[in-house]
Amino acid sequence: MKQLLIASTSTVHGSGFLDYLLEALKIHFKTVDTILFIPYARPGGRSHEEYTKLVQNAFSKIDKTVKGIHEYDNPKDALKSAQGIFIGGGNTFVLVDQLYKNDLVGELKTVIESGTPYLGTSAGSNICGLTIGTSNDMPIAYPKSFKTLGLVPFNINPHYLDPDPGSTHMGETRETRIQEFHHFNSQPVIGLREGSYLEVIGSKIRLKGVLNARVFEKNKTPYEIKSESDLSDLN
Amino acid sequence: MKQLLIASTSTVHGSGFLDYLLEALKIHFKTVDTILFIPYARPGGRSHEEYTKLVQNAFSKIDKTVKGIHEYDNPKDALKSAQGIFIGGGNTFVLVDQLYKNDLVGELKTVIESGTPYLGTSAGSNICGLTIGTSNDMPIAYPKSFKTLGLVPFNINPHYLDPDPGSTHMGETRETRIQEFHHFNSQPVIGLREGSYLEVIGSKIRLKGVLNARVFEKNKTPYEIKSESDLSDLN
């Protein structure tokens, strides 16, 4: 049975890496001693080792060991034997490029669908959707495909940002960008504000965290949903 | 001899489409009666016809006729016979996807290098650089390649935005994104603020408009350059 937490961000303003999620992670990873971490998104270009150390420091607070996938000779075997998996944020294009280059997309989907508990934040959440077509990131790498894991039947927009009514900047708002997406794509998009996350247990999908999320469906006016809303039928 | 204006935006806050550029465009397109417009970036998903009408309205103010490339049976022939070319903003991925699908990338480069005056704004400026790897846009289409025209030997970041010191949002700042780009790519990047543009005449590249621009070179601290700065040697 699938068990995923798909979070908008690793870090909310004013607290440490993963801090706001730790209580939920204790439950999510309750049967897990060692978490396999995939550092491929490399936020700020940091190395796999540095990023894994940051993640280890956070998970130490709930007594979990972390191993980076780069520490294994065979990353596919690492996925197969993982008790739990975390993919953190950074650049979604770099992450997806590395997942394809290491031929891990299929295996990752298989092990998560078989029940290996998964946590994604930001870029690691984007890839749970059908494509990375609603990423906010700069396209600094060219992956073989924008198709991703499809663990939920829609797309994720992490770090969702409401329009700033005082702005004089002429760049598109997030809402405009997602509406443009729907001129060329049909799947729904969930705009997850920082602090929100989706909990997926089997076929049940629920919005968690204190904030509302914003749902974009093709040819519909975008709408808000409250925390604890059931999204299992959105597709 | 190449003649390009590469502008951050079509529109500055508080004025109409292209208004702030009209005086420069009178000179830039002084030998041109009819401008070939390429509406492929489709801002807000608008149709080629609607977008071309908007552009015709703006160019009417300086007595130019506009024809959309979609009005021609053979878009490659349209490029070959164009007196002047304008590619406007919208979504860079959609634009590049359409340029590749219509097999226009090579011909566009050829005619601009042969001297057909060119104006790009936003997405139409991004493609003047080496790649679209520093686009701000959402990847709502998957183009065959991120490589673009290379009419200048660096990348463009249009709509450049300074970090907001009061922000509590955890998404990356523009500067962070461009610095991440340099972990995986080596070419310089010019952050063009709204209202700035580059003027390219032959091998001379100059910053125009009243604002400074921000230059990012790999392994260097980013720096500001003033209007009228010469960028001909940046590569």
Image (cartoon, coloured by chain):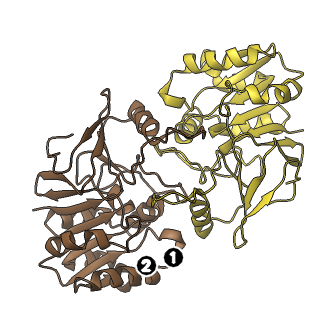
Chain colours: A yellow, B brown
Residue at mark 1: B46
Q: CA distance from mark 1 to mark 2?
A: 6 Å
Q: Is residue A73 visible?
A: no
Residue A216, relative to residue A85: is it above or below? below
The local secondary structure at tag 1 comes to loop
Mark 1 crowd level (few <14, some 14–19, many ≥20, 10 Å Cα):
some
Question: Dot 2: few (<14), some (14–19), or many (≥20) neighbours within 10 Å?
Answer: many
Indicate whether A178 appears above or below B29. above
Q: Residue at x 20, y 50 (%)?
A: B227
Q: Is residue A175 visible?
A: yes
Residue B1 rendering spot, x and y as whole percentages:
9, 62
Q: Identify which residue, A147 or A173, lies in the foreground.
A: A173
> Which amino acid does the dot numbered 1 rest on?
Arg
Identify the subunit bearing mark 2. B
Residue lying at 25% horizontally and 73% vertically, measured from the top left: B85
Q: Quadrant of residue B219?
A: top left
Sequence-first disc among 1 and 2:
1
- Dot 2 falls on a residue whose secondary structure is helix
Question: Which amino acid type is shown beneath numbered disc 2?
Answer: Tyr
Please name whichever residue, A17 or A233, is drawn nearer the observer in this view of the structure.
A17
Image quarter of residue A40: top right
Residue A159, x across and y down, in percent:
64, 45
Which residue is pictured at 69% across the width and 69% down the height? A218
Side of B21 where A129 appears, left or right? right
Chain bearing tag 1 is: B
Q: Position of residue B105 (x, y in %)?
A: 32, 62
Label annotation for residue A134: none
The reply to whether discs 1 and 2 touch (Cβ–Cβ < 8 Å) is: yes
The residue where tag 2 is placed is B51
Left or right side of B209 for A153: right
Q: Quadrant of the C terminus of chain B?
A: top left
Q: Residue at x 37, y 86 (%)?
A: B71
